[in-house]
Amino acid sequence: MEIICPLCNGLKKSNQICSNCNIPMKDTGPIENYFDEYSPYLDKSITQFLNSENPEICVHLFKCESCGRDERISISKEFH
Ligand SMILES: [Zn+2]
Ligand SMILES: [Zn+2]
């Protein structure tokens, strides 16, 4: 048994809806990956803080491709 994020592992799809457009938002992945990908030189202490603060939560960044709105959603990890 290990605790994993169902979204990161493709077990579930999120149905986060943009409150502006009423269309599904795109899951751009966990926020720590987002930081890694787009800000390679960013101080990692922020993401480490997030992880240690809530080891059972995976924070995903959702983006609406229509209006550009983004939202951080906390995903509860599950045992598998
Ligand atoms: Zn995740
Ligand atoms: Zn939108």
Image (tube, grey):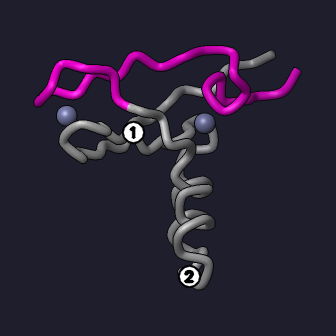
From the image, which quarter does the C terminus lie in?
top right
From the image, which quarter does the N terminus lie in?
top right
- Judged by its main secondary structure, the magenta piece is loop
Q: Residues within 10 Å of mark 1 (few under 14, many from 20)?
A: many
Type of amino acid at the residue the image marks with label 1: Phe
Q: Residues within 10 Å of mark 2 (few under 14, many from 20)?
A: few
The residue sitting at 30% across, 43% down in the picture is 71
The residue sitting at 48% across, 35% down in the picture is 27
User: Who is closer to the viewer here, 63 or 59?
Assistant: 63
The residue sitting at 40% across, 16% down in the picture is 15
Residue 41 appears at what percent x and percent y? 59, 84
Residue 4 occupies which quadrant of the picture? top right
| Region rendered in magenta | 1-25
- On whether ligand 2 comes within 8 Å of the CB at mark 1, the answer is no
Residue 48 appears at what percent x and percent y? 61, 64
Which numbered tag is attached to residue 43? 2
Count the numbered circles shown: 2
Q: Quadrant of ligand 2?
A: top left
Which numbered tag is attached to residue 16? none
The vertical placement of 11 against 9, above or below, is: above
Q: Residue furthest left?
A: 20
Q: Residue furthest right?
A: 1
The secondary element bearing badge 1 is classed as: strand
Type of amino acid at the residue the image marks with label 2: Asp
Q: Nearer the viewer, mark 2 or mark 1?
A: 1
Badge 2 or badge 1: first in the primary sequence: 2
Mark 1, residue position: 62
